[in-house]
Amino acid sequence: MQSFSQILLECIDEGLSVLGNEPREAVYQFLKTICSLSHEEIPERVPDFAAGLKKALGGASKVIERVILRKLFEKTGSTFRDAPDTDFSEYVLDARRRYEIIAHRHDDTVDITRSKKGQFSS
């Protein structure tokens, strides 16, 4: 399974791709030079990413955030529900929490399956 950070970065890439390849790269460059935020740091600095995106795109950042969030929730096995007064960072935390629960259940299922087949013992 992919890590949540990898999935988040993929979704951000896909979300920014709606702008086109060159504008997407321009946003990443803006984040790196103006906001001191590298691509790899985004999963640990989601509030900084959201603030940088707003600086770069203004009101259009909300549209891009929603595209990213829809993809993120889809890839993590959940359904995105738009809630008033919930910001991008809160949604990402919620998606991370849901993903970790699902990933933990998957790990438990794999362990049970292996022990039933006698491949591993406790």
Image: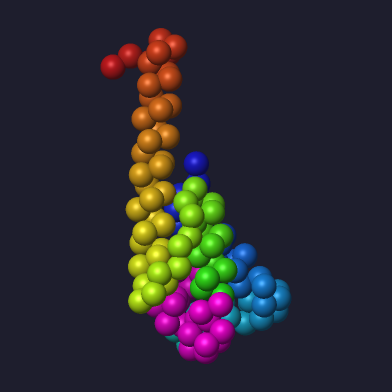
Q: Nearer the viewer, residue 68 or 49?
A: 68
- Please state the extent of the stretch shown in magenta in the rendering: 37-63
User: Is residue 36 shown to the viewer in this render?
Assistant: no
Outermost residue to the left: 122
Q: Position of residue 32 (x, y in %)?
A: 50, 80
Q: Magenta stretch: residue 48 in it?
A: yes
Q: Is residue 101 above or below residue 81?
A: above
Q: Position of residue 6 (x, y in %)?
A: 50, 55
Q: Magenta stretch: residue 55 in it?
A: yes
Q: Nearer the viewer, residue 34 or 122?
A: 122
* Quarter of the figure with residue 89: bottom left
Q: Magenta: predominant secondary structure element?
A: helix
Give the left or right position of residue 4, taking residue 24 as reference.
left
Give the left or right position of residue 46, taking residue 27 as reference.
left
For the point 41% across and 63% down, the residue is 92
Q: Is residue 88 above or below residue 3?
A: below
For the point 56% across and 84% down, the residue is 60
User: Is residue 49 shown to the viewer in this render?
Assistant: yes
Outermost residue to the top: 118
* Quarter of the figure with residue 30: bottom right
Q: Position of residue 83 (x, y in %)?
A: 40, 69
For the point 66% across and 81% down, the residue is 23
For the point 52% across and 88% down, the residue is 59
